[in-house]
Image (cartoon, helix red, strand yellow):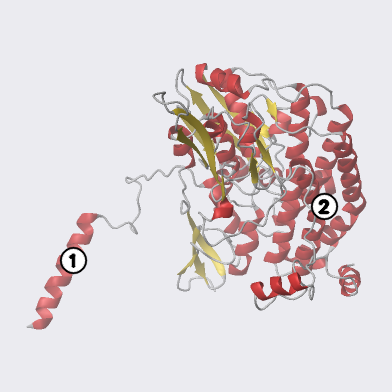
Amino acid sequence: MMMHEVLKLLFKKPFTNKFPAKYAPKSTYGFIKLVKEGKAQIIPPVPTPPKFRGKLKYDRESCVGCGLCVKVCPAKAIELVTYKEEPKEEGARPKIIRKIRIYIGRCVYCSQCVDICPRNSLSMTDEFLLANEDKLAKELIVE
Amino acid sequence: MSGGKKYTIPVGPLHPAVHEPITIKIDVEGEHIVGVDVFCSQVHRGIEWLGMNRNNPIQSIYLSERVCGICNICHPLCMVQAVEKAAEIMPTERAEYIRVIMAELERIHSHLLWAGVAGHEIGFDTVFHYTWALREAVMDLIEYLTGNRVTKAIMMFGGVRRDIDETGVRKIKEGMQYYLERFHKIEEIFLHDPTIKMRTRDVGILTREDALKLCAVGPTVRASGIPKDVRQDFPYAAYADIGVDAITPDMYNGEVHGDVFDRIIVRLLEVKQSIEIINAALDNMPSGPILAEPNLVKLQMLLKKADGEGVGRVEAPRGEDIHYVRLRKGEEPFFSWKIRAPTYNNLLPWIPMLMGEQIADVPIIAASTDPCMSCLNRVTVVDVNSSKEYVLTKEKLHELSIRKTRRLMRNAH
C-alpha cells in the first residue's frame, strides 16, 4: 500500500511553486536587473485567496481622524498624528488636522480597523511581499 | 535487569523528540522506565496579563487567537463565548453554524497534523509526508474561507466576521468529498499497517481508572473508553442541533486498550465525524445576519457597561478548553481572565503511560496526547511546602557553601 504511494510520487512533478526563479539567484539585485532588461522572467507567486488580508491601504482624503482604528488595533500598529495647518487669513487660529499613521511592521493583518472605520478609508490589498531589514522603512509606513 | 542501578535521564527542556519546551525526568533501570516526573512552564508569555491590563475586549480576541498556533478557532471561540455570557449577548443563528464549520475544519487539520507527527515520531516519514499532503486540502479551504491559513481572525462577540457564500458552500462540500474518498486510504495506512501496529499496540496504556482520576480530556480520555466530549455533554454553538456522539475505540473494533493505537483510532474516526458534522451544518445552515451587533462602536460601549462573569467551554482538537472571563462595569479590559488549555490535563497521564515502557517509546507516548506546551503555560504556581530534595533552599545552599570553605581550608593546611 505505502510502496504503491511511494512509487507513484516518484514520477510526480514537485508541487512547489518556484517563486521568483527556478534556482535561487546569487544576487537579488542582479536578478531584478536581468528581469528589467528582459533577459530573465519572474515565475509568478501562487495567487492569493479572495479574502486575503495583505498590506493596508489608507485613503487620507476621506479620513476624519476619529481614532477608532487606533483603539481597536490589537498590535497598536496605528498612531494618531496631529498636524497644524497655518491659517490663510491673518489672525485666525491654526487649523488642527488629525490623520493616522500605520506601522506595517507591527500589523497582524486582522483587518479589524477596516471593519470599524466609519468612512471606509481603510482597505486590505493583495500585497504580501513585505519583508524588510528595517521595520521603519518607507514602504512599511502608510500615511 | 531489575535490581540494577537506577539512572535519571532528562528529556528537554528543548529536545527534538518533544518539539516544545518541557522537561521529563525519567528514572530507568536498564531500558525500562521506573519513574517519571514532568516539569512544565518554560514558555509563560503573560497573555492573560495583557488581556487584563492593556487590551480592550476586541483586541483580546486576536490575542487569544495567538495562544496556540493550531487551536486558533477554539481559543477565541471559547473566550468569545465567555464574554457573551458575561455581557448577555446572543450570537446569531447563522454565526453559530459558521462557528461549528470553522471549528470542525480546524479539527480535521489538527488531527491530520497529529497523525503525520505520530508517523514521524516512530520513524515512518512516508506516512508523515502523505498525511501532510492530504492536510493541504483543508488548509486551502480554510484559506479560501477566512483569507489566512493560520490566524483566521473570524471570531467576534455576537457572531463571526465573515460569511460563507454559495461558492464557499460548494468548495467545502467538494473538500469534504475529497476526504471521504481518501478516508479508507488513511485508515488502511494507520490501522492496517504492521509497522504502526507493532510500535503502538499496548504501548503507553492509560487505564480507565487513571484517566478518570487524572482528569484527562479529549482523544486521550476517549481512547481509554470514557465517552467524554464537551460537544456531547454540554453542547455549545450549533452542536446541539447537529448532535455529536463521543467516539471511543470500541466503536471501531469492539475493544478498549487505552494505548497509543487506540488514540490513533479515535482521532481518525473523529476526522470522519467532523466531515459528517460539517456536511450536516452546511445542509441546515439558516440564513440571516452573521453579527448580533454590527456596529462595533455600540458593541464596545455595551461591553464597557457590562458587569458579570462567564465561562466558555469548547472541545478543542486536544480536549476541553476553558476560558473564564469577568467584566466589571466601566472598565474596558477584563477584570479577570483565566485560560485552561487541554494539555494541562493531559500532562499528568504521561506518568502512568510512561511507567514500565522503554526509552525509545517516550517520543510516541508523549506525542500521543498531542501536547501543546505554549497553550499549557498560563500561570505558574509554586508550592514550596511540597518541594522535594532537588530544590535547594537558601539555608541549605549557605550551609553547603560553609562546608566547602571549611574543607578547602582543611586541605590548605
Q: Nearer the viewer, residue B250 or B363?
A: B363
Q: Looking at the image, which is closer to me, A140 or B22? A: A140
Q: Give the position of the N terminus of chain B as an image quadrant.
A: bottom right
| Residue drawn where x is 41% and y is 24% of the image | A93
Q: Quadrant of the C terminus of chain B?
A: bottom left
Q: Which chain is indicated by disc 2?
A: B
**Which badge, 1 or 2, is on the more N-terminal residue?**
2
Could you tell whether B249 is left or right of B88 in the image? right
The chain under label 1 reads: B
Q: In this picture, is B382 found above or below B132?
A: above
Q: Nearer the viewer, residue A78 or B190?
A: A78
Q: Find residue A119 and report its horizontal and vertical position in percent.
A: 64, 27
Image-based side of B210 in relation to B185, left or right: left
**Mark 1 is on which residue type?**
Ser
Task: Give the quarter of the image for residue B135.
Answer: bottom right
Q: Secondary structure at mark 1?
A: helix
Element carrying mark 2:
helix
Name the residue carrying label 2: B137
Q: Is residue A56 above or below residue B292?
A: below
- Dot 1 surroundings within 10 Å: few (below 14), some, or many (20 or more)? few
Q: Is residue A20 above or below residue B365?
A: below
Q: Amino acid at mark 2?
A: Ala
Mark 1 lies on residue: B401
What residue sits 50% from the left and 60% below the top?
Answer: B24
Residue B377, disc: none
> x, y (%) of residue B306?
52, 17
Q: How many discs mark residues in the rendered view?
A: 2
